[in-house]
Amino acid sequence: MDSLLGGFGTGVGRLGRIFAKAPVSYAPRATQWLTAMLGAGGQEGQMRAMGSVGTLFAIVTRLANSTAAVDWKLWRKAPSGKDDDRVEITSHLALDIWNNPVKPFFPGQLFRETFQQHLELVGEAWWVVSRSEIVRSIPLELWPVRPDRMRVVPSPEKYIQGYIYVGPNGEQVPLELDEVIQLRMPNPLDPYRGMGPVQSILVDLDSTRYSAEWNRNFFLNSAEPGGIIEYPTELSESQWEKTVKRWREQHQGVSNAHRVAVIEKGKWVERQFNMRDMQFAELRGVSREVIREAYGIPKFAVGDVDDVNRATADAAAVWFGRQLTVPRLERIKGALNGRFLPLFGATSANLEFDYENPVPEDEEAERNERDSKATAAKTYIVDCGFEHKPVLEYLELPADWELKPTPAPAAPMPPGSAAGEGTGSAQPAPGAPTARLELVMLPFDQEAGWEPFATRGRKRRTENPGRTS
């Protein structure tokens, strides 16, 4: 192992002083080399499946595109721990590399879409860190590599001893722990490798691909009407060649489909099944459902919008961002903050990467929440008489909500009296309701806008007309 892994001693020894040894053994010594050399089997086939099954291509492309299109920022953490108090960092080597990992071949979005495809197909993504030959401690680039070319070198004491990259020509390149960053969906049977949705639906993917190929070959090579030609005696060589040649000329290919077959001295035996019996349309429909189910993705996410209107489309966009895009971004965020940023030493202290929220605003939900809070505030403050400030704080509403008085209904005038008769100002009848306070929301101002659930104005107080100050 020492000869293969080369200069692992310095880097691994330094990390060994920082991290404790594994409390339990994950790999027996006898199988270290076997695991390192064999790696994860079948991953190349899982990646090739994307190019042979249309439903899988649509799902992986949609998920990878939506994940790669999200913007990222680098922040300095706030002492309060609140995201709103963080300070954005616009100049840092880690940010430059993440935005443009490999100039000019892999800009940020292409880099993220590439490794996200690997994650969706095989449950693993690998970044190889390229460093300066002069000052090794400085990372310069991030390269995405195929999962099927990476090998993990397990260790009974340290969990992972290192990594090996197997090149296209079989060359083996040893890599140290700080040169590789792995993202993976956990595999319940292998703590070193990942497991993706494709592994759970390989049989269904094969069925879908084979049914499509069968349909294609049917139109290219079928000699309809299909069946068996039986001869009572054995044919000579010339008779056999003559029969086969004539049959192919008359019936093979799309242009000759369904021609009447004329057979000399032979007997035609019909096949036991036909295209309708095979039910290829139903088979492919079932396969599409199974593939979507494995990814937890609904029909609308792959363009099936037969039963989607504007309201359901808006709700679907919110659901897609919240349930599918955000979990994938959280996995990337964990790798950035847990593995990538520490490579920059003290310059990355108290820094963190974070993504822009990909979930679109749910206008209906926000409107319902705003109306609900307004109703609750009115009930507590106006109807029940609670203090103004604690209620707004409890409901997470701004403190500048306006309390506007609503005029009390006019008291009925005595019979025979007329408006304006008598002297002095009109007084409310005994027991007549007085003015009360009511919480209102001002209309939306297109130019000034509004903060969520906020109205502008100030609290006004209504004096009792009958009280003297």
Image (cartoon, rainbow, N blue to C red):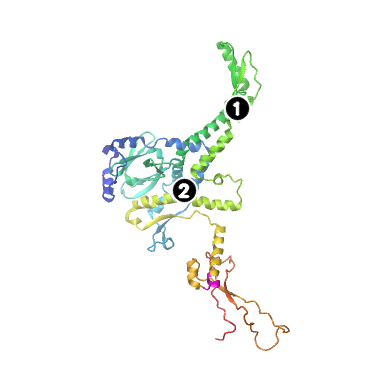
Q: Which residue is at 65% across, 17% downward?
A: 262
Please state which of residues 90 and 31 is positioned toward the viewer in this rendering: 31
Magenta segment boundaries in residue numbering: 380-385
Find residue 109 and name its label.
2
Q: Is residue 105 visible?
A: no
Please state which of residues 37 and 316 is positioned toward the viewer in this rendering: 316
Q: Where is residue 385 in the image (x, y as percent from the top left)?
A: 52, 73
**For mark 1, what is the residue?**
274
Q: Position of residue 109 (x, y in %)?
A: 46, 48
Q: Which amino acid does label 2 sit on?
A: Gln
Callout 1 environment at 10 Å: few (<14), some (14 to 19), or many (20+)?
Answer: few
Q: Earlier in the sequence, mark 1 or mark 2?
A: 2
Q: Is residue 77 visible?
A: yes
Distance, label 1 to label 2, CA atoms, is: 48 Å
Taking 156 as reference, is 239 above or below it? above
Q: What residue type is labelled 1?
A: Asn
Callout 2 environment at 10 Å: few (<14), some (14 to 19), or many (20+)?
Answer: some
Q: Position of residue 282 (x, y in %)?
A: 58, 35
382 falls in the magenta region: yes
Q: Which residue is at 57% across, 25% downward?
A: 221
Left or right side of 16 for 87: right
15 falls in the magenta region: no
